Image: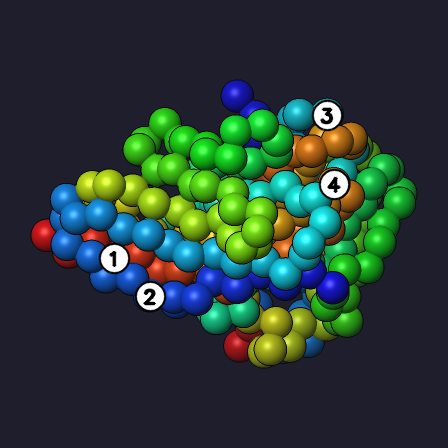
Amino acid sequence: AQSVTQLDSQVPVFEEAPVELRCNYSSSVSVYLFWYVQYPNQGLQLLLKYLSGSTLVESINGFEAEFNKSQTSFHLRKPSVHISDTAEYFCAVNRGGNQFYFGTGTSLTVIP
Amino acid sequence: DVKVTQSSRYLVKRTGEKVFLECVQDMDHENMFWYRQDPGLGLRLIYFSYDVKMKEKGDIPEGYSVSREKKERFSLILESASTNQTSMYLCASRPPRGAGELFFGEGSRLTVL
């Protein structure tokens, strides 16, 4: 079975500092990769996704993630975080069917 | 804009009660899902449905059942709620083919006393 590892359960970072949230997955076959964000007491919202093509994908609010096939990673980065980025972030992997594998989440706290 | 609506955001029930969680999507998606979210465990799939009246067990179906009588509606049923079913429940939908993301509802936070 597929597994998804988010190594950091909590990441505190000062406002305007850069951040990286790490995600590794176990499969060596072709996969589709997703990052979701969850604000308190809300559902998950898609932040960005890799389906094919360029290995660097970007979101509209400044996040980016790079698909690294050799390292089976899909780390999420932002060069300068804002208070409003405080949320839970989930990495997910899919192989084209209806089974999605989620990491356990990383809680990002932006400190003023 | 796509929409997945969960009817109850917060529920408090007593042990042994029957609980219905309703989910409606307006995107004409064939696939619908129910996940359970607990701290430190991420999201775990309870059931999913790929068509009306069709369902498949996920990773943790015990203690739950589902109903899909219409394409847009997918219900999660707890026949006899127990305290270990206190959790956040998330409904999602997805188009039928190819690569595509899950679209989530706002979640239903259930507390069983």
Residue on which the image places disc 4: A96
Real-space CA distance between mark 1 and mark 2, rounded to the nearest whole angstrom: 8 Å
Percent coordinates x, y for residue A19 in the rendering:
27, 51
> What amino acid type should be assigned to the residue bearing mark 2?
Gln
How packed is label 4: few (under 14 Cα within 10 Å), some, or many (20 or more)?
Answer: some
The residue identified by callout 1 is A109
Secondary structure of the residue carrying tag 4 is loop
Q: Which chain letter goes with mark 2?
A: A
Residue at horizontal 53 percent and vertical 64 percent from the top: A5
Q: Where is residue B65 in the image (x, y as percent from the top left)?
A: 79, 60
Image location (x, y in percent) of residue A47: 44, 38
Q: Pinpoint residue A35: horizontal percent, then vertical percent.
A: 49, 45
Instruction: Give the label on residue A10, or none.
Output: 2
Q: How far apart are marks 2 and 4 (CA)?
A: 30 Å
Q: Of the two numbered discs 4 and 1 on the same chain, state the one appearing first in sequence.
A: 4
Amino acid type indicated by mark 4: Gly
At mark 1, the secondary structure is: strand
Q: Name the outermost residue toward the front.
A: A70
The subunit letter for the residue under badge 4 reads A
